[in-house]
Amino acid sequence: MKTIGNKIKELRRSKGMSQKDIADKLGVTSQAVSKWENDGSLPEMTMLPDIASLFGIQIDDLFEYSTEKRYESIEKKLQYGRVMTNMEFENEEAFLIREVEADPTNYHAISLLGDFYGHRAECMYQKSVYYAKRAIDLHPNQKGDQILVQIIKDCTGKYKGIFLSAG
């Protein structure tokens, strides 16, 4: 299993950064970064958000999950209706697609992909309705409002009232 140190080294190299570059940005010594990368020590927990931010990833991405834990994590995000960042969505999508490519009969991955895309579509519909309503509120009776009204009708019809709080 890949350690946090291995992950930091991999990310650092992929960004073309030296240990000193990382150390300077995080306010630690290059020796500390070297110890992390060689599993001689771990970064303090309070540094994990800064490390993740430095590499443009989520804190969770610093940890190596088993396949089952990864499935469980995706299921929980969907179950709780958590809105994911684009990067988070793309990472989870890539994982599920790799799973399906490795085994085209993988029901678990295929069904999660269906739920996953459905969740994303629902989030996009919510945003669409929210901004359509805002545009109409800002400039009522504008040419083109018919299109915005149609968006609202189409979206709210599909999801039966879940958008009533938008706007």
Image: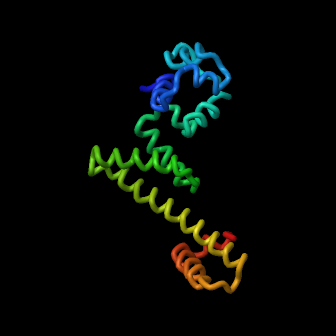
- Compared across the picture, whether 20 is left or right of 69 comes to right
Q: Quadrant of the C terminus?
A: bottom right
Q: Quadrant of the N terminus?
A: top left
Residue 45 rendering spot, x and y as whole percentages: 64, 27
Give the quarter of the image for residue 112.
Answer: bottom left
Residue visible at 44% across and 44% down in the picture: 71
Say above or below: 19 vs 54.
Answer: above
Say above or below: 93 vs 126.
Answer: above
Q: Residue furthest right?
A: 138
Say above or below: 163 vs 89.
Answer: below
Count of picture labels: 0
Residue 58 rendering spot, x and y as whole percentages: 56, 40
Say above or below: 136 vs 104.
Answer: below
Residue 109 rendering spot, x and y as whole percentages: 37, 50
Residue visible at 51% across and 75% down in the picture: 158
Residue visible at 68% across and 28% down in the picture: 46
Residue visible at 46% across and 45% down in the picture: 91
The colour mode here is rainbow
Query: Could you say which is closer to the camera, residue 114 or residue 19?
Result: 19
Query: Could you say which is closer to the camera, residue 132 or residue 142?
Result: 142
- Compared across the picture, whether 80 is left or right of 107 comes to right
Residue 88 rendering spot, x and y as whole percentages: 52, 47
